[in-house]
Image: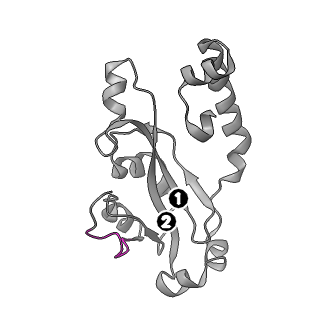
Amino acid sequence: MKLRLNSPHTDISFRFGVSLSLVTNLIDSVIPQLAHKLKWLIHWPNKDDILRSRPDCFKEAFPRCVSVIDCTEVYIETPSNFAARSCTYSNYKHHNTIKFLVSIVPCGSISFVSRAFGGRTSDKIISLKSGYLDFINHGDVVLADRGFLIRDELASRGAELIIPSFVKGKRPA
């Protein structure tokens, strides 16, 4: 329930008739173990594999694309600590969130997931601090939406940022 619905700990405690501390301890111990066990599923393939497995639409429109990136936000309970509350408040979602950078290769498999950042953190800062840019090489093309202001950082690596026209100029939902 926690992974699928992000139910509050108090709700899970009530539904299953167990203490709040038991729910908290279980989630705090199981989630890291699950992440460790499933980490092997997320890996950055070599460039030849990326280019060979691209769908035809990418071969035509973005022939050098190796990554499509976006940040995703997950709602969290409002922290009681004021500093944590401030760091996690997202003006975009109007709620406290944590934020992750996710990269997929053109065939659709996940190639990178960053550590969690507070919801207030910009997409650019997450891109720079997450280690994502270490996977980008000379000649690569990255697709992103207009929130990713990393054109100069990619250019310094000999790579290119493309913001597809269907996201240019659109207002956030």
Task: Using a 10 Å C-alpha cutoff, classify the residue at mark 1 as few (fewer than 14 neighbours), some (14 to 19) or many (20 or more).
Answer: many
Does dot 2 land on a helix, a strand or a loop?
strand
Which quadrant is the N terminus positioned in? top right
The magenta segment: 162-169
Q: Residue at x 28, y 66 (%)?
A: 170
Name the spot of residue 130 as percent of width and height, x first: 46, 46
Q: Which of the two residues, 11 or 85, is positioned nearer the viewer here?
A: 11
* Location of the C terminus (image quadrant): bottom left
Question: Is 59 situated above or below 159?
Answer: below
* First in residue order: circle 1 vs circle 2: 2
Q: Amino acid at mark 1?
A: Ser
Q: Residue at x 48, y 39 (%)?
A: 116
- Between marks 1 and 2, how big is the CA–CA gap? 6 Å
Q: Which residue is mark 1?
A: 103
Q: Is residue 164 magenta?
A: yes
Q: Was residue 45 drawn as part of the magenta stretch in this picture?
A: no
Identify the coloring.
one colour
* Crowd class of label 2 (few under 14; some 14 to 19; many from 20; radius 10 Å): many
Label 2, on which residue? Answer: 68
